[in-house]
Amino acid sequence: DPNVPIIVTTWNFQNSTIKAWDILSNGGSALDAIEEGATVCEVLQCNTAVGFGGRPDENGETTLDALIMDGRNMNVGAVGALRRVKSAMSVARNILEYTKHSFLVGDQATEFALKMGFKEESLITSYSTSLWAKWRDEDNCQPNFWTNVKPNPNEYCGPYNKLDTLVTGQKRNVLVDEFNHDTIGLVAVDRNGDVAAGTSTNGLNFKIPGRIGDSPIAGSGAYADNTVGGAAATGDGDVMLRFNPSFLTVEEMRRGASPTTAAQTAIARIASYYPSFSGAVIAVTKDGEYGAACHGLQTFPYVVQDISRETCELININC
Ligand code: SD4
C-alpha cells in the first residue's frame, strides 16, 4: 500500500511539518499542506531565513521568493523579489489559483498582492537593520555577490554611494554557510495521491537588489508531477538554478531511481561543475517513498511525517 499521506520538509522546521501534517491527516489537499506549512515558517521567520526581517539585500531591504506547484495539472504560482508583503507563499498560491500566469516579480508582484487583498507592510525589522548596518559599517559593505568586475568596496555602500568606481579582482565569496541557508522546501502527497511541492525564502544576505535565486523557479526550487512524485531544493541558489535539480530528481525517479539515488544524481551533477557549492535536495515518490542528498554541508537535516509515525521525525544525513 502507498505510504500516503506524507510531508517532507527541508531543514529542521518542525512547526511547518506539524501544520502540514495536520492538514494532510485530516484529509486536506497537498496544495493546502504546502501553502499552510510554508506560511508557518513565514510567520515564525524560521531561522530568519524565511519570511520578513531576515537576509537584507545591499539596500537593507528584505524581499521574498516563493513557489507552489500542483502535480495534478502542472500548474505553478511563484513570486520573486516580492516587496513589502509578508505572505509570499499565499501570494504564489493566488497566482496559481486566480491567474493564467506562473510567475510575478518585484513591485508588480506587490501590486498584484494588494489587489488580492494582502496587506502592504515593511519587511524590515530591528534585527535585519542591525545585520545590514554591521555589514555596511564594520564589514565595509564587502560586496558578497560580485565577481570579475566588482564595485570598489570603499566607494560602494548600498544606497549610500554611487556605483561609479569599478575595480577588477576578487572571486565570489562563500554564498551559503551555516548562517546563510535554510530555505523551506516542502513536498507533500495527500490521501488522494495528489502531489504538490513548494518553497519559501528571503534569499541570501546582502544579495544585489533584484536578485532571485532558485527557490521560486519551477524545476529548480521545487517540482511536482502526480505521475511520479516531487522534489525541493535548498542551498546556493545562484548556482543551483543553472541545473534544475528538482526537475532532474523527478525525472530520475520517473526512470525508476529511488528518491535518494535520484536526489544524489541531481546533486552530483551540480558538484561536477561546482565542487564547492552547498545545497541539498529532498525527494518523495507518489507512493510516499522519500530520500535526500546534500553537498558542501557537514550534515543536512530534514523532517518527515507520514502514517507510520506518531510524530514528525528529524533525519540527518551526511553530505
Ligand atoms: C536562495 N536557495 O535564494 C536559496 C537559499 C537557500 O537554504 O536555500 N538557503 O539561493
Image (cartoon, rainbow, N blue to C red):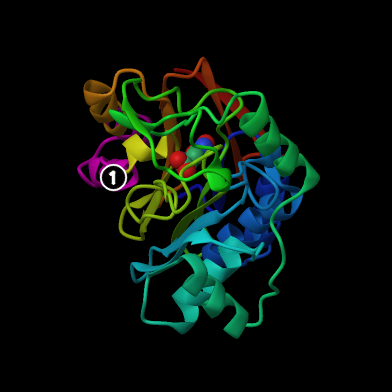
The answer to whether residue 75 is left or right of residue 58 is: left
The answer to whether residue 4 is left or right of residue 173 is: right
Q: Is residue 214 visible?
A: yes
Q: Is residue 274 above or below residue 82?
A: above
Q: Give residue 200's position: percent from left, percent from top.
A: 55, 52
Residue 253 inside the magenta-drawn segment: yes
Is the residue indicated by label 1 positioned so its CB lies within 8 Å of ligand 1? no
Q: Main secondary structure of the magenta part?
A: helix
Q: Give residue 75's position: percent from left, percent from top.
A: 37, 70
Q: Give residue 129's position: percent from left, percent from top.
A: 72, 43
Crowding around mark 1 (Cα neighbors within 10 Å: few <14, some 14 to 19, many 20+) is: many
Q: Residue at x 55, y 33 (%)?
A: 181
Q: Foreground residue, 146 or 44?
A: 146
| Amino acid on which disc 1 is placed | Asn
Q: Is residue 58 visible?
A: no
Look at the numbered disc 1 and give the secondary structure of its residue: loop
How many numbered marks does the figure carry? 1
Which residue in the structure is indicated by mark 1? 244
Quarter of the rendering containing residue 76: bottom left
Q: Residue at x 20, y 43 (%)?
A: 255
Q: Foreground residue, 139 or 317?
A: 139
Q: Which residues are magenta?
A: 242-265
Quarter of the rendering containing residue 20: bottom right
Q: Is residue 91 above or below residue 246?
A: below
Q: Residue at x 37, y 36 (%)?
A: 259
Which quadrant is home to the C terminus?
A: top left
Q: Give residue 278's position: percent from left, percent from top.
A: 42, 25
The answer to whether residue 16 is left or right of residue 72 is: right
Q: Foreground residue, 228 or 121?
A: 121
Residue 145 inside the magenta-drawn segment: no
What residue occupies the far right of the structure in this picture? 126
